[in-house]
Structure formats: C-alpha cells, structure tokens
Image (cartoon, coloured by chain):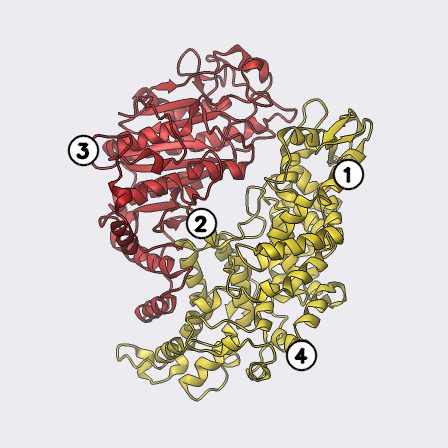
Chain colours: A yellow, B red
Amino acid sequence: MDLQQRSLAKKIAAFATLASSGADRAARTDNPDQPLPPPTADILTLSRCTFGITEALARQIDRLGREQWLRRQLDWNRIDDSPVEEQLHKQTPTIYMSEAELAELGNGFRVASQLKQATLFRAMFSPRQLYEVMVEFWNNHFSIYHRDGAVILLKTLDDRDVIRPHALGKFRDLLHASSKSPAMLLYLDNHTNVAGTPNENYARELMELHTLGVDGGYTETDVQEVARCFTGWAIADWRSENKGKFQFYPNRHDQGAKTVLGRLIDPGGGIRDGEQVVDMLAAHPSTARFICTKLARHFVSDQPPQTLVERMSQVFLDTDGDIPSLLEEMILSEEFLATADAKFKRPMEYLMSALRCTNPTLERQSYASLGSYLYALGQLPFEWGPPDGYPDTAGYWTSTNGVLNRWNFASLLAGSRLPGISIDYQGLAGDNRSAEETVDSLAHRLLHRRLNRTHREAFIRFLEDKDPENRLADQGDFQERIPALIGLMLSSPYFQYR
Amino acid sequence: MKLSRRKFLQLTALGSASLAAPRLAFSSEGNDRSDDIIISIFLRGAADGLNIVPPWGDPDYYRLRPNLAISEPGDQDGTLALDDLFGFHPGMVSLMPVYEQGDLAVIHACGSPSPSHSHFEAQDLMERGLEENTNEFNGWLGRYLDYRMDDSFGVFHAVAMGIAPPRTLAHQASSIAMPDIESFTLQFPTGEEEKIRTLLKELYSGDEMLDQASRDTLAAVDELALADPLRYAPENGAQYPDSPFGRQMQAMGQLIRADLGLRAGALSLGGWDTHEGEAATLESLVPDLAGSLAAFHTDMGADMNHITVVVMTEFGRRAYENGSAGTDHGHGSFMLAMGSNVNGGQVFHQWPGLKDENLYGSGDLEVTTDYRQVLAEMIDRRTTGMPLDTLFPGFSGYSPLGIFS
C-alpha cells in the first residue's frame, strides 16, 4: 500500500517551544534523577488518546490546551479526514462495498486484508485520532474473529456500519447496532438460534462480555431466556434481495412469554423481545460499571481507580451511555494525570506510535512488514479467536516473546531494514554538531520527555563510541550510529508506556 | 511483580517456615526420584467430552443427540470402542496404539466443580486450580514450580509455546513464551549487539514491569542459540501434523531433547466452542490434537518415562444438542494423561449417566471426578511432591485414583 501521502518532516523547534512553554508541566517532570521522568500532562494525554505523538499534534495541544484539544477530538465529525479517505478509496476499495458487491466479489482474503490495511492506515494517518482509538476499543469490545466463515466479508460491514457510526456516540445505539450486525450474528451463532432448540452463544456473551460482565447479576436461566428472545434474529439468505443484511424471521421466533433479569416479557413480542433486552441491558447499572471499568482500564490503569469508575458510571447512567461524556470525565480527571506510564503499550499502539514519531516513507510492501510483526506480537486486527477481545492489561504482553519482537521491530524499523519502510534520518535528527545535541533532539522527537541523567549519558556514550573494532566508529562519525540509537530509544522503557 | 529467581530463592530461604511445614500428603520423604517434565495442554473453548470420548454404551447418549452423536462401533465413521461404555471419536485413531500400549489414560465425567459456564471465568479458575475466585494469582503448575525451585532451575524451566504464557504457568519467576523456536533470535544491527544489550540491561534495570522479562529474553536467546534445539529431527518415525499445534508439540519435544532444563511446559489448542456445526469442527480439531500427542509420544520414545502430559478443558458441553447442529456450554468433560508411567489403556470414571434426572443444571454431564484429583495425583506420583494445600488451596479430599504409578 502506498502510504507516502504524508509529509511531516519537521524540525525539532516545535518541541523546544513546547518545553519552554511549561504551562502544565508538573514540577516532578523536571527532575532528571528519577528512574523514568514522567511526561507532561499534554504528552500523557496525547500518548493515551492517539496512536502516537507527532510534531503536529504536540504543537496543536500546546496551542489549544488539553481541554480544548480533547473537545476538538471528541467533535470528530468536524475534523476533516478526506485526504485519508481519498487514499483508502484507491488502496482499499472493498471497505466501501455493499453487501451485494462483497458477495459478488467473493474474494474473502482480499476483503479481510484490505480492512486490516485500512485499520492500520487510519490509525497512522487519520487526524481523528481519539476517534480511531475508540474504534479500536469498540472493535475489541465487540470482538469478532476475522476467520470464521463469511465473517471474512461481513466484518467489513460491522466495522463500517456498526462500530464507526457509534464509536463516539451513545452506547445504547452501538449495542443495538451490534445486536443486528450480520458479522456478530454469524460469529456468535445467533443466525441459527431458533424457537424450540435455542442457541445460547450470543445471549451469554451479550451479557457476559458486551454489557453486564460475568458478575453482573444474571443467571443461567437468564441466559436461556435471553436466547429465546433472540430466536429468529438472523442474516438474510445470500440468494435473497437483502442478502448479507440483518433479517428477523418471525416463524423462527419463540413467541412465548419470557422473564429476563426478573422482568416479564409479554408473549407475542416478536422482534421487540430482543430489542427490549438490549434496552434493558444498555441501561443496567452493571453495564455502566462494566463499560466504565473497561474504559478506565484502557486509558488510565490496569487497576482502574474505583473513585473514577464510580463517577464515570454515574455519568453513564445520567447520559444514557454518552461516550464523549464518559471520555471527558475520565481524561480530565485527576486520576488520569496521576497515573503516567501506568499503561503498557499493546503491540498495535507500540508499532503505530513508533511509525508516527519516526515518520518514515512507507511503500506498498510496508503493510506486509507491519502485518508480520503485529502477528508475531499477537495483535493483528480482528485475529483474536475468542469473543473477549485482546487483553488490555500488561501481563499478557510483557512476555519474552513480546519483549523480543518489540526490540526486533524497533531495531529493523530504525535501520530502515523492514521492506518498504525507510526513515529520513536527516529530517529526524536534524543537523546537530555534537552527540549531546543529537541525543537531546532525538529524545524530544521520539520519546517526548526528559531523560534520566544517567540514561542520557549512556545514550551519548553509545553514540560517541570509539571502539576500534567498529569499522563505522573508526571513521569517527557518530552520525553513522544514529539508526542504532533510534532503535535503542524505541526499545527503551521510555517508549513502552503510556 | 516478577522476582528474579535468585531473589525469590533468597526470600523463600529467609521465610523458610512455609517450606518446613509438614507435607500433608504425597510421597514419602527421602525419595530421590527426580521430577517428571510436566506438559499441560489446555483445550480452550470447552471441548465436548461426549463426542470426543463418546459414551456409546449409554442409550441416553443417542436419545439426547439424535443428529450429533458419534455412531456405534462398527458403523462407518463410528466410535472406536475402548470398552463397553466408552470409545474414541474416529479422529482419535492415531492415539489408539498409545492407549492400547497402556501409555494413555482417559478420565471421564471429569472437570471443575465450579458452576461457571463462562469460558473466561472457568479457564481462569481451572488454570489457577481454584473452585471459586480468591486472591491467588498464580497457576497450579506455577505453584508447583515455585515450590520446587532451587539453584538448578534455569531460564528455560517453564516454557509456553505461544504469544504469552497461560495463567497455568504463572509463578514467582518468569516463564519463556515463544510461538516457535526459529524466530526467537535478536535482530540488532551487526557489530552493535553487545553494546545494545548492555545498554538495554542498564535502561531496564529496576523497571517494575520489564526488568526481569528483558533479562530473561536476553538470557533465553543466548541459551537457545547455544543449545540449538532445531537440530533435533523427530525420532522413531514420528510425524507431527502440519498444523500450528503440531509444530508447537514438536518444538516442545526439541526443547526437551536440547536439555535446556525444562521442568514444565504449557500449550493451548483453541476452537472447541462448538455451538454450531460441531461435527465439522471436531473432524478437523480432534485429529490435530490426537496426531500431535501421538507424534510427541513416538518422538520422545523412551524419554516418556520421565515426561507426563495432561490435557484438560474448562468445561464440557450440554448433553443434548441444540438446533444449530452444535452444543451449548455444559459442565463435565474429559481429561487425558499420557506417559510411560500412566496406568493407561483404561477410562477412569464414575459414570453419572445421562438420564434427565442425572444431568447437572440445565442438562449437563455431571462432574464426578474433580480435575484436581488427577493433577494432584500427578504431582504426588510423578514428582517429589508438595503440600496439597499449596498446590490446590481450598481443595480437600484427595484420594488417588491410580492413574499414575
């Protein structure tokens, strides 16, 4: 894929401006003796609300301030991302296709691959960064495995028509849309859920994973009753006019009375049975708590502060699950600012942020390189088999495999050794006369924070290395060692957390 | 937070009261037998014990599964009879010789007493060896490792084939995770490796999340390169299935052959959540499982004398089929134990029956053998043993079934 659209080769000046403005720098960020000096509030906000910090973003938040920047991001519809979409129309046309067109195309592999590419492309280049972060969050919350039969085609529709319209909307609307998503109906087998011999798969995961949570107060009987409510919810046959679309089949629906979470659902409700269940679940206090815990776990800490979760849950119940209101409450909270570096970047966040700060030239084959590393690290989009989504806590990702592949990716990216990806070192490091200046400017550019004094000295030593066995160093030119230094910085603890 | 092995040993030496506590069960003292290498395989998604080891001798099986049951022995694609009550799914055929040779035992109507029908909760509980949620974070196999740990434990003492170690292995020190052996190498720029490694150690020193993982990664890469496990081709004519699981079983065998100090290994095979179209799913998964286990058994040959493999799943499937040619979440399922010291060639069971009044909850196979009975007996008989209440907190009533000698 051709990712050359972007030209962000900028100088370090912006960061100098940022550093000198100092408006919301916590005093402790100035202390170079801390093991890992934390980022400023602005930088922390960017690192959690985007897929990676760029020069332009850093300048923007410095100009607007955190609150204003956040409100702009939440008003996602007014951010122009037409250049990105224009590119995608050319590169990944299948993401815009209708059910019928996809069915005719029939090339599932191409469709799935283009959706993955588009996902990465948008994460890297869309100016609607918080929106893309939330699209990823909801795609993971309503996780659907790409390689489950016709899901390979239908996930394209789920991403476009279910997740994206509601990613920054109301949770209730998102849940309704998901409950009628052909990809979800197929993945969780509800398309074969019929009166008399119900299939419980969707009913269970709807409550356990999408809304109430496993301890949310439902019983095994509730699972069976909810399954009955969703009998007849299916996908129109590929031969019918509505092929690939949601369809309710009244003759497969169990028309008897049901009791769900202690509430009677009258007989003869038809499609309203399931819709009523969705409404009940969307407004349930357990859902509020479950969703807010997941949001806070994603944006704040693996152990979300309970005070924050409680305030967010109240906002959820007061606003009918208004997602921007939840994000505002969370991102502007004290708990958010008090937890710098509490989150370990997951592979997708790690790769995207490394690309966004090094701003390489990306050619068509770069997608395969990125895909292979996301695969090795275990987070290729839509490839998590079970319905609970990729883990969102550090424990899963900090394995030897995780560490090894991060270091390898950083090293290959920095050395322009990944096919189709090359870095403009001059643009990135600038014209620095000394190793000190180079280390400082690269740290600003890549790590966005102050270095610990000892670490800074170690980086400088590395750059100045005069080891006689090293042919390049023999030339006495530290510039030659800049790629290795970039790899080292991206491999360091400074770049693993958000 | 992970402790280094040395630090962990220091701590346990200081607080050695727990080590000196009387051993509540298990082997006699003074037994100098070394521990088996334990390989734990988790079938994720709730594997259907009723169709993988069909109770063909129970007429209610055919009543509850008119379309889905595996037909009787002798029929085309029929059950491979093990005895008058049980048989194997035809996809298990490659394990028949291992069973007949007495190296494979089946434990049926087996599982966790936890009533959870959630995959994620039930897997989590089973891997931690618990019946209900407590603060215990580590896995049952991890607790065994913690108990046994001494200076002889190297960086490869616990290995998971995959992206991350499963909870089963979680313990005080860290486990190695690798999806395969081939790609477990560092790609630092030529000539810079040593300097980069030194600097990474310095940068990560004291890092709460990654200090230990980064050290282990560097150490593991070196040890692996030195031992070169890939040079070990399968022996005795073993042929692993050409599947991710087959390759991972082969890799586990190579790590054992390379003598890297493996004490416990963990693998997962997913995809067993057969709510719909179950027959087709089992037709591909069961031969993958069986073929990989059989090839491992053949490959390891005489070494199976000090290797024990156990296979488990979070729960079974509903005894009656649903309208989607599948089965919903159930309760009891099955386990497998494989090794030269397994009293194989038999199905251990207290069959609860499949009459409606015998079923659990909404219509599930009852659990009559707690999975912890099997695992506790394995640790008891195939290692030098450890206190039962450390291995399985809250579990009492251990009585060996004679699965292991």
Sequence-wise, the earlier of marks 2 and 3 is 3
Q: Is residue A96 left or right of residue B178?
A: right
Is residue B254 among the parts visible in the rendering? Answer: no
Q: Which residue is mark 2?
A: B163
| Element on which disc 3 rests | loop
> What residue type is disc 4 on?
Arg
Q: Distance from label 2 to label 3 (Cα)?
A: 37 Å
| Element on which disc 4 rests | helix
Residue closer to the observer: A463 or B286? A463
Query: Where is B150 relative to B34, above or below?
Result: below
Host chain of mark 2: B
Q: Nearer the viewer, mark 2 or mark 3?
A: 3
- Count residues near mark 4 (Cα–Cα under 10 Å), then give few for <14, some for 14-19, many for 20+: few
Q: Residue at x 30, y 29 (%)?
A: B339
Q: Quadrant of the C terminus of chain B?
A: top left
Give x and y (percent) for residue B219: 30, 58
Mark 2 and mark 3 on one chain? yes
Q: Nearer the viewer, mark 4 or mark 2?
A: 4
Q: Which residue is mark 1?
A: A275
Q: Distance from label 4 to label 2 (Cα)?
A: 41 Å
Mark 4 and mark 2 on one chain? no
> What residue type is disc 1 on?
Glu
Sequence-wise, the earlier of marks 1 and 4 is 4
| Element on which disc 1 rests | helix
